[in-house]
Image: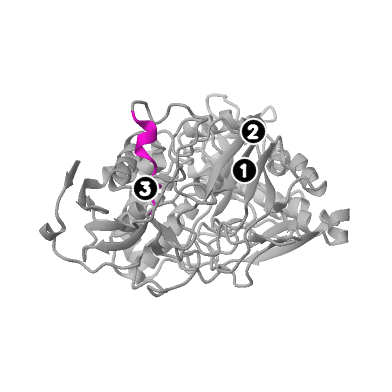
């Protein structure tokens, strides 16, 4: 890769724009005032407290080492472009005032706003931009490194402009490049990027860290001199003056703190708890308000993931048997009151989700070259097994036993054993404080016991949990992958075959499929929206038929309990209560 300074006259001219869309044009005009779901006149002020479970040992969210509060990346740092959460595949200028691309998107050029500043009031420069791309691409978290391998060179083309040339046919790269966080180069002169983990990198975002105690709390203050307050993408956002995050050992303690008035808002993911456990005094007095936020995004995938790098999870028959033995209907009724429906596939509840029955049309064409390597059901059609709702689940357990027998497992002395006499024992790696999944695992263990399988949970602290997932050191573990209406290069990190052996990716299940790799390539290179949709639907088929995850219930809407003083705009974004909604566009009003 090379870095150079060239005059703009050396390039073919392209038309600059205030935004960029994957297909077509951005929905908002160049003179838009604010995002459609933000209130540009929202008042500023207020002090709020949120809660996290677990702990933290780092304030640098951009490196692989350590665990930083997840809010760090979103509250204190900005990129050249920013997302509208009302459009699936569109970015608008943030640090950059304009963007240009080649017709084939083989390069992208950004021009910085002259007023862009870091929180220490120093200007954001092209040098900072180039350093950030290289540093994140070589020393940063794995999520940032793939882009760097797809950059041929970066060139400064003017006092405030930078052009990035790509070496890969991937139309999304121009958008991904626009979303890389920009950090201050001078802060790290003479030392490694990973040094001083409890020193927060200097960013250009609206919030800065003012106080913290490792593992206990971190407090953010709104920068009164924030440079971007009048940028259209930011107008009506970052309205709260102070935001503190307190850390708790588990969700039960966190909820009790909220009931006692120590926290300002909590998100609830269990519909039964939402319906039955929120009638406490503060709610009865009207001091706490329950708000439901609908959305139109895919379900994503939540459940227990099986590590196919290890036997016996490398056998699809064993994975199907474990799916059959998971008595979802009974477990769901026990844990959520049966209110939340099951997740049927990764992109379900959206236009990108697989269609039932055999693959047809363009979807089948994309899958056909890989017919010999596809999991059973990918072409013919596959659906998750359903139980009869009873606790015994006898029919599905009989079917599971037949599959296990076909895979070489038989019951001897009350235990399921293979031909070598090894018992089938499964350990579930769990994060400390995950009480809901602990209940699920306990119910599941009773069912597996009837098959002669031993299932036990292994609870570890947050640091061990992250480290062991990064090294794929588990049989099964909790899995949550939120998916969007604009899936792209991150899909390689989620299920690309490189993650089968490379530590630290998000391919926890160990997908190693030429079909999956090809479908992701098609998603990223096509210029046709129809082909893109077909490729995602085909990907959804392969992943679902791969039987990698035992899905649980979907989060069909956002549920936020909050102090009555917290308000949000009436107009809701397409993505509902996702990143970019609460607290971004909320405000505090006495």
Residue 6: x %, y % from top left: 14, 51
Q: Is residue 243 left or right of residue 177?
A: right
Give the quarter of the image for residue 19. Answer: bottom left
Q: Nearer the viewer, residue 431 or 144?
A: 144
Q: Earlier in the sequence, mark 2 or mark 3?
A: 3
In the displayed structure, would residue 189 be above or below residue 315? above
Q: Nearer the viewer, residue 160 or 513?
A: 160
Q: Earlier in the sequence, mark 3 or mark 1?
A: 3
Main secondary structure type of the part rendered in magenta = loop
Does the segment drawn in magenta span residue 48? no
Q: Residue at x 81, y 55 (%)?
A: 278
Q: Residue at x 21, y 57 (%)?
A: 106
Residue 22: x %, y % from top left: 35, 65
Q: Residue at x 77, y 51 (%)?
A: 334
Q: Is residue 313 visible?
A: yes
Does the segment drawn in magenta span residue 188? yes
Marks 2 and 3, how far apart at CA: 69 Å
At label 3, counting other C-alpha atoms closer than 10 Å, the crowd grade (few under 14, some 14-19, many 20 or more) is: some
Disc 2 versus disc 3: nearer the observer: 3
Question: What residue would you read off at disc 1?
Answer: 401
Give the quarter of the image for residue 213. Answer: top right
Q: Quadrant of the N terminus?
A: top left
Question: What residue would you read off at disc 2?
Answer: 411
Q: Which mark is residue 323?
A: none
The secondary structure type at the circle numbered 2 is strand
Q: Residue at x 70, y 58 (%)?
A: 560
Q: Seen from this angle, which residue lies furthest top?
A: 421
In the displayed structure, would residue 214 be above or below residue 106? above
Task: Tell me where the magenta segment starts and ends, as one range.
Answer: 179-189
Question: What residue would you read off at disc 3?
Answer: 123
């Amino acid at each position: 890769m090379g870095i150079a300074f060239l005059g703009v006259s050396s390039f073919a001219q392209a038309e600059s724009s205030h935004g960029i869309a994957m297909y077509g044009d951005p929905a908002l005009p160049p003179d838009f005032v604010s995002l459609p779901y933000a209130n540009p006149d929202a008042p500023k002020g207020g002090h709020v407290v949120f809660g996290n479970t677990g702990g933290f040992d780092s304030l640098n969210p951009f490196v692989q080492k350590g665990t930083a509060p997840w809010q760090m990346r979103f509250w204190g740092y900005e990129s050249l472009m920013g997302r509208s959460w009302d459009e699936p595949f569109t970015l608008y200028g943030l640090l950059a005032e304009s963007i240009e691309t080649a017709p084939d998107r083989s390069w992208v050029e950004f021009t910085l706003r002259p007023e862009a500043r870091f929180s220490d009031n120093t200007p954001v420069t092209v040098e900072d931009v180039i350093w950030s791309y290289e540093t994140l691409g070589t020393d940063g978290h794995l999520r940032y490194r793939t882009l760097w391998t797809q950059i041929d060179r970066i060139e400064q083309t003017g006092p405030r402009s930078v052009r990035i040339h790509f070496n890969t046919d991937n139309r999304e790269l121009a958008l991904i490049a626009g979303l890389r966080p920009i950090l201050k180069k001078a802060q790290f002169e003479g030392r490694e990027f990973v040094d001083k983990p409890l020193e927060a990198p200097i960013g250009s975002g609206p919030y800065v860290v003012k106080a913290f105690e490792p593992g206990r709390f971190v407090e953010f203050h709104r920068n009164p001199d924030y440079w971007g307050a009048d940028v259209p993408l930011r107008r009506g956002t970052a309205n709260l003056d102070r935001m503190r995050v307190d850390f708790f050992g588990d969700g039960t303690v966190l909820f009790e703190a909220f009931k006692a008035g120590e926290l300002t808002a909590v998100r609830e993911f269990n519909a039964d708890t939402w319906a039955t456990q929120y009638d406490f005094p503060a709610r009865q007095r009207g001091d706490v308000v329950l708000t439901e936020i609908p959305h139109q995004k895919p379900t994503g995938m939540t459940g227990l993931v099986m590590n196919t790098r290890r036997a016996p999870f490398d056998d699809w028959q064993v994975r199907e048997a474990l799916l059959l033995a998971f008595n979802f209907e009974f477990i769901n009724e026990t844990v959520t009151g049966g209110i939340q429906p099951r997740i049927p596939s990764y992109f379900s509840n959206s236009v990108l989700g697989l269609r039932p029955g055999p693959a047809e049309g363009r979807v089948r064409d994309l899958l056909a070259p890989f017919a010999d390597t596809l999991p059973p059901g990918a072409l013919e059609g596959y659906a998750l097994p359903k139980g009869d709702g009873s606790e015994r689940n006898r029919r599905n357990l009989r079917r599971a036993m037949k599959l296990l027998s076909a895979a070489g497992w038989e019951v001897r002395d009350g235990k399921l054993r293979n031909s070598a006499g090894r018992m089938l024992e499964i350990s579930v790696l769990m994060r400390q404080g995950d009480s809901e999944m602990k209940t699920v695992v306990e119910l599941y263990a009773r069912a597996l016991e009837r098959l002669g399988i031993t299932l036990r949970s292994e609870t570890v602290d947050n640091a061990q949990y992250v480290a062991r997932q990064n090294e794929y050191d588990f049989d099964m573990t909790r899995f949550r992958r939120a998916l969007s209406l604009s899936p792209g290069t991150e899909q390689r990190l989620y299920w690309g075959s490189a993650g089968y052996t490379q530590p630290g990716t998000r391919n926890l299940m160990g997908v190693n499929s030429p079909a999956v790799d090809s479908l992701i390539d098609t998603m990223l290179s096509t210029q046709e929206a129809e082909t893109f949709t077909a490729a995602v639907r085909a990907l959804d088929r392969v992943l679902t038929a791969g039987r990698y995850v035992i899905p649980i219930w979907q989060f069909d809407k956002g549920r936020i309990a909050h102090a009555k003083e917290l308000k949000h705009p009436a107009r809701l974004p397409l993505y509902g209560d996702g990143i970019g909604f609460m607290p971004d566009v909320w405000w505090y009003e006495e």
